[in-house]
Amino acid sequence: MPGQSQPNVLLFITDQQRWDSLGYTGRTPCRTPHLDRIAREGVAFDRCLTPDPICSPARAALFTGRYPHATGVGNNRELPLERPALPEVFREAGYHVAYSGKWHLGRGRGAAGFDAFAGERGREYKQWLADHGFADTYPYGTPEFSFHFEGGDRGRISNPRTAAQEGLTETIFDSWVSSRALEQLETRPKDRPFFHVCSLHGPHPIFVIPEPYHSLYDPAQAAEPANFADPMDGKPAFQTGSIWHGAAREHGTTWEPWRRSASVYWGYVTLLDELIGRVLLRLESLGLADNTIVLMTADHGEMMGSHGLFQKSSMYEESLRVPLLIRAPGRIPGGRRIDAPVSLVDLAPTLLSLTGLSEPGGALLAPQSRDLSSWLTGESDVPAANRGASDDPAAGAVFSEYKPYQGEGMTDIRCIAGPRYKYAWNRDDRDELYDTWADTAELHNRLDDPSLASVRDRLRQRLLGWMRETGDPLADAASADLG
């Protein structure tokens, strides 16, 4: 059993939050003072990519250190997570394990490791509202805030429309989640270290939040992205035939209606930052901050009209790139930013190493993820290849994948992203190759550019190798397609 000096872990997860919404990046007007403080006192990863740009697969990968095709959680319908996950590993090591908020991985074996759980937007939250005489004013799933499509087993997704939510900020779901996180901190056993997760619903649409956050930012501040009017020339056909394109087109083909969506999204992020700040301040008041590893990340990003798309399910940077902040006083030097590509799958082995639990999770997590702890502690430098100093475009690469569901209009995707180049194999459609340094908006598919033929071939080779190494069931199909 670990002693009281064993470091605690406090993990914050938001849903559908873009990296550029963090205030310290200076990319948008969005203000996130509490998250900026974590970045200032810890390490900020500037290019953390999700292993799958949709909720459940990304979360399963985060908690296991394995890619979606290995966890068995291929999309939001393939639940629950049956493979043992981080909560179980920490609990077996003697930690008190608590979870508040969105789990989205079913109630199978992956959830068995919790000592305390206050979960999804469901019975427990609604009962709390009823007990206190509050109405649930969040209109999720209503026709006004839905895009309806034919086919499949869903029939609708949330659209980009906005509205001010009635009622008090304290009664919304995310406030309830943060309050449960505070209770879990206060009522934890004092003789055991803890592994606690606070998983917030926002800024996932619908974009309905209370004032003053709904009107906090001026829509005029929302500049049109360079790729908003992307004609999608030379890009796969499924992108303009998917429900994500349909929802975006319905909202508007000019930037004007998107200004409000973007500004309310920023207000949502600032609201979440304040809720995270409450938990961090309580951590300090309880005298726990100096012995607690604090992490913040998100499951995937948000397209917000870029490339004519909405929400996620895309291998473009807006959807793939997520925040990753890690602070550990006395364990990792603060005030650093790392631009090497990393993945959410790397969090599990890194956390186990930082807490001295590498062995219990070793067999579970290897070999699909990397332990980044030596980068954090300064025991080893970030490899030069990861800073683009290598002739190998696949050096330091990370991977992402996607499995469509019926009626979505998508295809199977496997993607490799190095420091500079990104290649996506789109099954039964046109593949994509981008130079993310020269073309940050990913407007030009360089797949057939003769000057990048060797880059394309090397990325293909490494992608196929990764698929073989990790037991991807589509390895043979990709190999036959790519020759």
Image: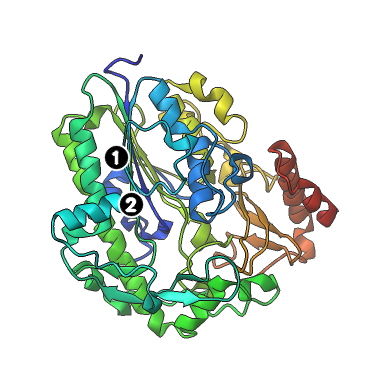
Quadrant for the N terminus, please.
top left
Q: Position of residue 406 (x, y in %)?
A: 62, 64
* Residue receiving disc 2: 200
Asked whether, in this view, residue 476 is left or right of residue 293, the answer is: right
Residue under the image location 49 percent in, 20 percent down: 360
Label 2 to label 1, Cα distance in Å?
22 Å
Q: Amino acid at mark 2?
A: Leu
> Which disc is residue 57 wearing?
none
**Tag 1 secondary structure:** helix
Near-viewer residue (254 or 177): 177
Q: Amino acid at mark 1?
A: Glu
Counting other residues with Cα less than 10 Å from the Cα at mark 2, is it few (<14), some (14-19), or many (20 or more)?
many
Residue 372 appears in the rendering: no
- Vertical position of residue 307 compared to residue 8: above or below: below
Q: Position of residue 95 (x, y in %)?
A: 34, 24
Near-viewer residue (87 or 361): 87
Of labels 2 and 1, earlier in sequence is 1
* Residue receiving disc 1: 41
Residue 216 appears in the rendering: yes
